[in-house]
Image (cartoon, rainbow, N blue to C red):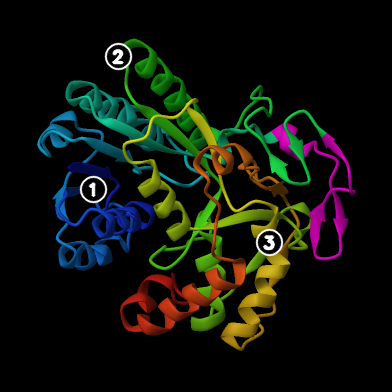
Amino acid sequence: MRILITGGAGFVGSNIALQLRKAYPQAKITALDNLRRRGSELSLPRLKNAGIEFFHGDIRVPSDIASTGPADLIVEASAEPSVHAGYGESPAYVVHTNLVGTINALEHARKHSSQFIFLSSSRIYPIDPIRALPLSEQGTRFDFEEGVSGQGWSRNGVTEDFGLEGHRSMYGATKLASELLIEEYKQMYGLNAVVYRCGCLAGPWQMGKVDQGFVVLWASRHLYGGKLSYMGFGGKGVQVRDILHVDDLAELVEMQVGKTMTRTIYNVGGGYEGSISLLEATQLCMERGGQDLGIGSVPETRAADIPWFVTDASRIRSEMNWKPTRSIENLFDDVFAWLTDYKESLYDLLGPKS
């Protein structure tokens, strides 16, 4: 088997590559990455030790993808992952990476009849309808009253049937546009393709920043020191996300290899049981990091921020007989263990000045 993982030195791509190596020890696995995001270079020894070939290339350049050779499976995990990308600046990088890059990967899949697994995002769901949901503050989080629901949403989360009308950020728009093109490639060329609309992903080897990867950001600040603020929606820290451990995602990708699904689009996330507010995350971090940072408050809400998102992944759970096996507590334990064990190499990236 020949496997190509785009964004293969990134947080998600590298963990998927290592999972597939365990499942397919004889496969030829190639990780393509431009190493633009700081910290991705730390994955290179891990990939090399697992016998995974690294190719320093850019998904925006078709010849770079072609140079990796034919592939039986392509996992498209490359992305500019920040939902704030393009605000106040040119959107060129996010558009060319997240949309043009996907087109280039699709062309490679078409030429070689590759199975195609695309990692999309829950941020394809539009901002204003999410903000308009009837949420209320309930203790440490935003939540719904018991039994309240609507088209494509309930306390259990947002389903694939949630409406798509409205704006969603340039990041979300590029992901949604990629999904539409994948559907066309599937219809026109018979491509075996599936799309995972992923909720928040977290785990060891994620280089968390203010605009992406809040679990690692929160954990590293509580362990290494530095400042944090609750941003938006009154600055109270009650906004909620569901979190999926990256290893649970990697195991799903492994299960997907060689399978043809009845549909193209599937939500993938931690669900209500895997959801957490920033206030609740702070408590878990204080218990593990041993320090109270006195977190600040910024009441103003940024343009792309949403107060709540929980993924209802019932469809993929049913069709693949899959569900996350790692709890929120397991996730934070793993992140803190990683931050402790690799402090020497991570402190400059994730410490107070980062």
Above/below status of 288 relative to 111 = below
Q: Is residue 107 above or below residue 301?
A: above
Mark 1 or 3, which is nearer the eye?
A: 3
Q: Characterize the local packing of mark 3: few (<14), some (14-19) or many (20 or more) Cα atoms within 10 angstroms.
A: many
- Report which residue position mark 2 lands on: 189
Is residue 44 highlighted in magenta? no
Q: Is residue 61 shown above or below 80?
A: above
Q: Earlier in the sequence, mark 1 or mark 3?
A: 1
Is mark 1 in CB contact (under 8 Å) with mark 3? Answer: no
Please state which amino acid type lies under the numbered disc 3: Ile
- Quadrant position of the N terminus in the picture: top left
Q: Residue furthest top?
A: 188
Q: Secondary structure at mark 3?
A: strand
Q: Is 203 left or right of 42, judged from the image as shown?
A: right
- Looking at the rendering, the stretch of residues picked out in magenta corresponds to 128-149
Residue matched to label 3: 276
**In the picture, residue 6 is in which quadrant?**
top left
Residue under numbered circle 1 = 34
